[in-house]
Amino acid sequence: MGAQWWSWALTLIGLTGWWLTGRRLWQGWAVSLAVQALWLAYAMVTGQYGFIVASIAYGAMATLNLRRWRAEAAAQQHMANQT
């Protein structure tokens, strides 16, 4: 039951990240990135090693998107300050 509880909790945290991202908050990408570390630990503890590949891929995607999101926000802020 413990492993199943963790998978539900991690899923809810991941969905929270997507929800925040959908609200156009950069913190959504940060939550999505952070939850990947938890999925990685879950995969190793439970021996479900397929989650390791998924965690690394999702973590890379969240990192790239967070960097892009922050760069775009900084550029928009810079343009707004010039006017």
Image (cartoon, grey):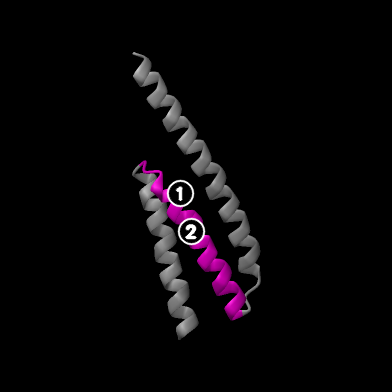
Q: Is residue 57 left or right of residue 74?
A: right
Q: Is residue 19 left or right of residue 32?
A: left
Position of the C terminus by quadrant: top left
Label disc, if present, on residue 29 of the rendered structure: 1
Residue 23 at x, y = what percent? Answer: 34, 44
Q: Amino acid at mark 1?
A: Trp
Residue 10 at x, y = what percent? Answer: 45, 68
Task: Examine the rendered structure and indicate whether residue 39 appears above or below residue 19.
Answer: below
Q: State the extent of the magenta-drawn residues as a range.
A: 24-46
Q: Is residue 42 magenta?
A: yes
Task: Examine the rendered structure and indicate whether residue 76 appears above or below residue 42.
Answer: above
Q: Which residue is more in the foreground, 3 or 69?
A: 69
Residue at numbered disc 2 = 34
Q: Residue placed at 45% from the left, 76% from the top?
A: 6
Task: Examine the rendered structure and indicate whether residue 35 appears above or below residue 19.
Answer: below
Q: How dense is the environment of label 1, judged by Cα within 10 Å: few (below 14), some, or many (20 and up)?
A: many
Q: Secondary structure at mark 1?
A: helix
Q: Choose the circle earlier in sequence order: 1 or 2.
A: 1
Q: Secondary structure at mark 2?
A: helix
Residue 77 at x, y = what percent? Answer: 38, 26
Magenta: predominant secondary structure element?
Answer: helix
Q: Residue placed at 47% from the left, 79% from the top?
A: 4
Report, in whole angstroms, how far the alpha carbon at label 1 lies from the one at label 2. 9 Å
Contact between labelled residues 2 and 1, with CB atoms less than 8 Å apart? no
Q: Amino acid at mark 2?
A: Ala
Q: How dense is the environment of label 2, judged by Cα within 10 Å: few (below 14), some, or many (20 and up)?
A: some
Label disc, if present, on residue 16 of the rendered structure: none
Q: Residue placed at 41% from the left, 63% from the top?
A: 13
